[in-house]
Image (cartoon, rainbow, N blue to C red):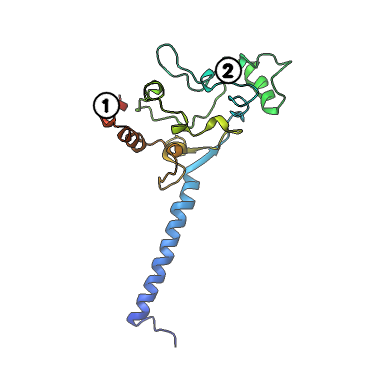
Amino acid sequence: MEADSKKPGGLKINGWIFFLVGLIAALIVGWIVFPLVLYSEKSQPLSFSHASHGPESDAGMECKECHFFYEDGTFSGIPGIKKCMECHEDPESPLGESPEEKKLFTDYVRPEKEIPWLVYSRQPDCVYFPHIAHVKMAQTECKVCHGDFATRKILPPYKVNRLTGYSIDIWGRNIAGYKKNTWDRMKMDDCADCHTQKGKENNNACFVCHK
């Protein structure tokens, strides 16, 4: 005979069923639906291949040729169109014949227009991050924070938080904040953990990064 739902045992079973259904629904909304709604995916203006430009390619370029430090110690970041034109300056004889390179000439090189790259690692305006202190002084490899971009043939998807306007690479692609690699996210806790591991706990003071 089926248990009478009006009896204490039946009520207990029904309670567990409602709990499990609610828990599963909450997990689906929180882990699947919410991230889909929170982030929107955008395409980069060009599909740039780091692998075809890097040290192991025919171009044989070092990372620092495009991503360099100025004399005052500030970091160049993403190079401007003039840097691209040092190699890609002749529309009649371009280095490569891909549709993306034709787009580079047509849309940017010829009109001398800057490429509106979407920056994966852009931090909030209140954060001061000196690359020179980490790259030159601390000898930190770029891939520690950014991953191994030098071997990428295509750029990864750019996902932006609809509320904050920042890339998903800042918070982390795991909605719970978990990470497997050092470059999986760029939150304040990650900076503080790295400072602590390297014995630089004093750099975790608020005024060091927030000017």
Q: Position of residue 185 (x, y in %)?
A: 43, 38
Q: Position of residue 5 (x, y in %)?
A: 39, 80
Q: Who is closer to the viewer here, 19 or 83?
A: 83
Residue 180: numbered disc? none
Query: Can you give x and y, in whole percent of width and height, for residue 154 in the image?
Result: 60, 34
Q: Secondary structure at mark 1?
A: helix
* Residue holding disc 2: 81
Q: Which residue is mark 1?
A: 207
User: Viewer-proximal residue, 53 or 21?
Assistant: 53
Vertical placement of residue 121 versus 23, above or below: above
Mark 2 neighbour class, 10 Å CA radius: few under 14, some 14 to 19, many 20 or more: some
Closer to the camera, 143 or 70? 143
Residue at the extreme top of the image, as rendered = 71
**Residue 37 at least partly seen:** yes
Mark 1–mark 2 contact, CB under 8 Å? no
At x 47% / y 43%, what residue is drawn? 173
Residue most extreme to the bottom? 1
Quadrant location of the C terminus in the rendered image: top left
N-terminal of the two: label 1 or label 2? 2
Q: Position of residue 15 (x, y in %)?
A: 37, 72
Mark 1 crowd level (few <14, some 14–19, many ≥20, 10 Å Cα) = few
Give the quarter of the figure containing the N terminus. Answer: bottom left
Q: Residue at x 50, y 47 (%)?
A: 36
Q: Is residue 52 above or below residue 16?
A: above
Indicate the secondary structure of the residue bearing disc 2: helix
Count the numbered circles shown. Answer: 2
- The three-letter amino acid code for the residue at tag 1 is Phe
Which residue is outermost to the right? 92
Q: Nearer the viewer, residue 181 or 90?
A: 181
